[in-house]
Amino acid sequence: MPVRKHNAPPGLDYDPITGEEQNISYGVVGADAGQSQPRRRLEDVIGRRLYPTDRPAVGTKWNDPTAERWDVLLPRGAPDEFRDPQRMCEAFHINDDGAIKHLAAVMTLKFPEADSIPSEMRLHEVWELSRGFGLLLALQLEVAAVAVLHVPGRHWGHGVPHCHLICPVRTVRPGSGFSTFVMPLINGEEGRYRLGRSRRSSSSSRT
């Protein structure tokens, strides 16, 4: 199946791009949220996925995310404070003066096999597979990657268990923190192709 870009369904903050693997979608979230809407910030992108329910009020501390599981995966030499996703989001916008147009690449991995009968994959396997792939991306691209596992049925929602990998589209450096933009992530179709290829390579190395 060729790479294809779709219009964002209601409530989604990016136009998903799909390819030959139907349970993987990819997209880039921009700061422009649409006419008459306030500009997005990175905390909007990550916060809504850490808190599928009971999201804290703007400006308050992020405590006890309601996602099933989550982790911040960092490249070598990244500042320790970036382990805190809220502080990492704040650092992304230092001195940007509203000039940043692209915020994060989001890759969503769906796992229908986790809900199949009989079950073909347990949730801990879903998590470790997704988290491992997120760490691979962080190390290869020198970016941060926030892995977030959702199990919609546990919150009266629809859909199968899935994991979001959210990569802010700037490299991370020991001294500078967030640095240059990663153009292959910003170019949606190229990013979808590269990440799909990396995932296939990651999966084959486990077999």
Image: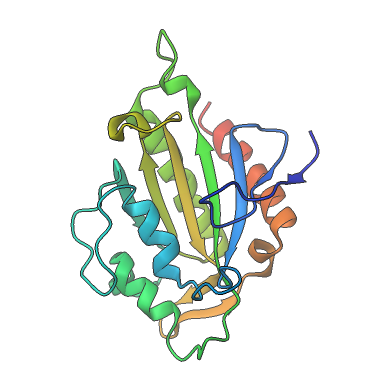
Q: Is residue 207 above or below residue 127?
A: above
Viewer-side residue, 193 vs 26: 26
Extreme residue toward the right, this view? 2
Residue at horizontal 48 percent and vertical 29 percent from the top? 111
Q: Position of residue 25 (x, y in %)?
A: 61, 43
Q: Position of residue 174 (x, y in %)?
A: 41, 79
Residue at horizontal 29 percent and vertical 71 percent from the top? 58
- Residue 46 image-quadrant placement: bottom left
Q: Is residue 93 above or below residue 78?
A: below
- The answer to whether residue 75 is seen in the rendering is no
Viewer-side residue, 129 vs 12: 12
Residue at horizontal 69 percent and vertical 63 percent from the top? 184
Number of marks in picture? 0
Viewer-side residue, 54 vs 75: 54
- The answer to whether residue 186 is seen in the rendering is yes
Does 87 sit left or right of 158 as displayed?
left
Residue at horizontal 41 percent and vertical 8 percent from the top? 118
Extreme residue toward the front, this view? 36
Q: Position of residue 62 (x, y in %)?
A: 23, 64
Q: Position of residue 63 (x, y in %)?
A: 18, 60
- Give the quadrant of the N terminus: top right
- Colour scheme shown: rainbow
